[in-house]
Image (cartoon, grey):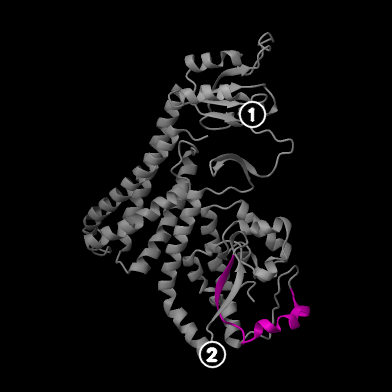
Amino acid sequence: METASSARMNRLILVLDAVIVLASGAISFAVQPWLNNYLHIFRGTVPAQQYALLIVWWLPLWLAAVVGMGLHRLATYPRSVWQLLWSLLKLHFVCFLALVVIVYSTQLEVNRSLLIIFFFFSLILMYLSRYLVILVLKNQHQKGVTRKNILLVGDMGESMQEFLLNSGNRSFSPHFLGRIIPPGMDNLSKENEQIPILGTTLDFETCLDTLPVDEVAFFAPFNSPSENIELLRACEELGIPAYFSVNMDQPTQASPRFTVQYEKPFVLFDVSPKRADLIAIKHILDVIAAAGMIVVLFPILLLVSFLIFVTMGRPVLFLQKRAGMNGRDFMMLKFRTMKIGAEKERDILLDKNEMDGPVFKISDDPRITCLGKFLRRSSIDELPQLFNVIGGTMSLVGPRPLPVEEQQQIKGWRRRRLSMKPGITGIWQVSGRSDVNFEQWMKMDLQYVDNWNLWLDVAILFRTIKVLVSAKGAR
């Protein structure tokens, strides 16, 4: 439950980070010439206009990384001192990679001494600012200024007890004002009650009027909004958020959450819900990184196209219909590695298939040309998919898209791999590719889908570089 105050705090942290980035840039630009008087190994400072342009390009990516790693949510997810330091070090590493992409894409000049000074000041300032914010939040929480006051309504059943237990494990645990019980039960013994009983539902409005209630949590037998409309209206009249617990006879793996679709309320069950803002950041970073890689690798793309044209003729690219997000068809691009008419020969080679499941793969495919073997071994044949990333049908990291006819043979839980946009690389590619059997491959894809975060994408991209160098599992 994120309150309005914590949401404001999150926005304040983002504004503070933007100021720190700009301030660190200004400080490093001013300090670098001074240090150069004592350490002559430093190069001269780059032109101010060019340096300012670099910061302007860099700042949005920096803030996107802060949001993606959840470093702006101190009020909701406070960290320990060491966790905070480690998270900021990871943030600076990710932002350094973003800077590399910007420099290569724009050819802006920057020297290493300036970057070292910048990262030093930004790390120190971000750490100190967050540490001070955490101290202030803890102090205010202990004094009760920011502590959330919750009024409970319902029986002390298993659901409420679990709610109390989970809330007590948080750094900023809420304060429970008391409990409202059904009429006719107020004559029960109130001794040994974990939460004080304030009265029955007949006293509900009085409690709202006289107590500092921030939120109301409804449990059985009052967890149906339609059956307790008067209690809900009392909360609405005072602008107090009301939460109704969801009881399920058979708990599911899916996480329930409330949503409104076409002006009708629903309880949504999503196995691995993804935050829309983080998915949007993933798409933006994909497009920026793919565009930068195309600029950097353009000579290679041009050379490979020329070699394919000279040795194999047209077409240079191989277009194949693949299954994308939630089963949508799209045309995936690859450099052509097989002779013309190879698709028609696939049925003849089915008895030589080395992969279990519906996937077709053989290590010594006679349809692949000599140049094609090199392109596959080095994974250069996958580079045209950077244009798929820019077009929005693929991501840099995600489950590998299968040909439509192969994907249609996959049923049941394995199809959940389609719930995220397919990628050029993924856990399967960095874990052996063709050396992994079909069931392991599907489980790896679901491991990515169910545990996705932006940092996982970064880790997979780095592991991909290592795999490309070793060419492990490539066929």
Taking the image as shown, residue 359 lies to the left or right of residue 323, namely: right
The residue labelled by disc 1 is 224
Given the image, on which type of amino acid does mark 1 rest?
Ser
Quadrant containing the C terminus in the rendered view: bottom right
> Can you see residue 197?
no
The segment highlighted magenta reads: 329-354
Q: Return the residue nearer the eye: 6 or 429.
A: 6
| Residue 382 in picture, x, y percent from top left | 55, 74
The Cα atoms of the two marked residues, 1 and 2, are separated by 68 Å
- Eye-nearest disc, 1 or 2: 1
Q: Return the residue nearer the eye: 210 or 461.
A: 210
Quarter of the rendering containing residue 178 = top right
- Residue extending farthest top: 187
| Residue 134 in picture, x, y percent from top left | 43, 35
Query: SS for tag 2?
Result: loop
Query: SS for tag 1?
Result: loop
> Can you see residue 172?
yes
The residue labelled by disc 2 is 313
Q: Is residue 391 above or below residue 70?
A: below
- Residue extending farthest right: 351
| Residue 221 in picture, x, y percent from top left | 67, 24
**Within 10 angstroms of label 1, few (less than 14), some, or many (20 or more) residues?**
some
**Mark positioned earlier in the residue sequence (1 or 2):** 1
Taking the image as shown, residue 112 lies to the left or right of residue 230, namely: left
**Within 10 angstroms of label 2, few (less than 14), some, or many (20 or more) residues?**
some
